[in-house]
Amino acid sequence: MARSLTGHWSGEYAYPRHKGPTTPFLATIEERGGQLTGTIIEPDMNGGATIAATIRGVRHGHGVDFTKQYGPAASPIYGNPVDYVGRLSADGLVITGVWSLLDMDGTFEMRRETAMDEPVQEREAVPVMLEPVESLRPG
């Protein structure tokens, strides 16, 4: 089984036949028991700075399938969900695949941001021996 998808990812998606710009995005994913949730932030192609979306999906082995849904603050042009279907690389660092929206589809690739996802090493607990309070009093 490939390692968990939980973490930060950067990527881009491309439109079919170059009908739109290649669009970068940042994703934060949490995986629990094969269920995926998270967020995506990307440039707003309709004049705003950025736009946010939530993702929900599943992961089976190296197969990844999620739906991106833009939030209520997004313009009506972003109202329809976008389906993503991809494959996780053997090393767990890259997902490549296709996206689809109504009668349009394109490709995407996302890469794990490993520097942000390194596990924090827990310090080994060191027992501390305290002397009874009475022995600390001058005497």
Image: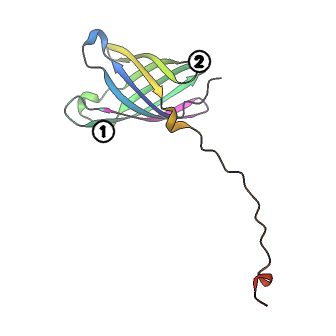
* Mark 2 vs mark 1: in front: 2
Magenta run includes residue 106: no
Quadrant position of residue 109? top left
In the picture as drawn, the residue positioned furthest to the top comes out as 17
The structure's colour scheme is: rainbow
| Horizontal relation, residue 19 to residue 114: left or right | left
Main secondary structure type of the part rendered in magenta: strand
User: Label 2: how many residues lie within 10 Å, few (<14), some (14-19) or many (20+)?
Assistant: few
Magenta run includes residue 40: yes
Q: Position of residue 30 (x, y in %)?
A: 52, 36
- As shown in the figure, which amino acid type bears the numbered disc 1? Pro
Q: Residue at x 50, y 38 (%)?
A: 116
Q: Position of residue 4 (x, y in %)?
A: 59, 30
- According to the picture, the residue beneath numbered tag 1 turns out to be 72
Nearest to N terminus: mark 2 or mark 1 = 1
Relative to 67, say whether 17 is above or below.
Answer: above
The quarter of the image holding the N terminus is: top right
The quarter of the image holding the C terminus is: bottom right
Secondary element at tag 2: loop
| Horizontal relation, residue 73 to residue 135: left or right | left
Quadrant position of residue 32? top right
Q: What mark, if any, has residue 90 been given in the picture?
A: 2
| Horizontal relation, residue 131 to residue 60: left or right | right
Q: Position of residue 122 (x, y in %)?
A: 66, 48
Magenta stretch bounds: 30-42
Q: Nearer the viewer, residue 2 or 54?
A: 2
Q: Residue at x 24, y 13 (%)?
A: 19
In the picture as drawn, the residue positioned furthest to the left comes out as 47
Secondary element at tag 1: loop
Q: Residue at x 46, y 17 (%)?
A: 96
Quadrant position of residue 63? top right
- As shown in the figure, which amino acid type bears the numbered disc 2? Ala
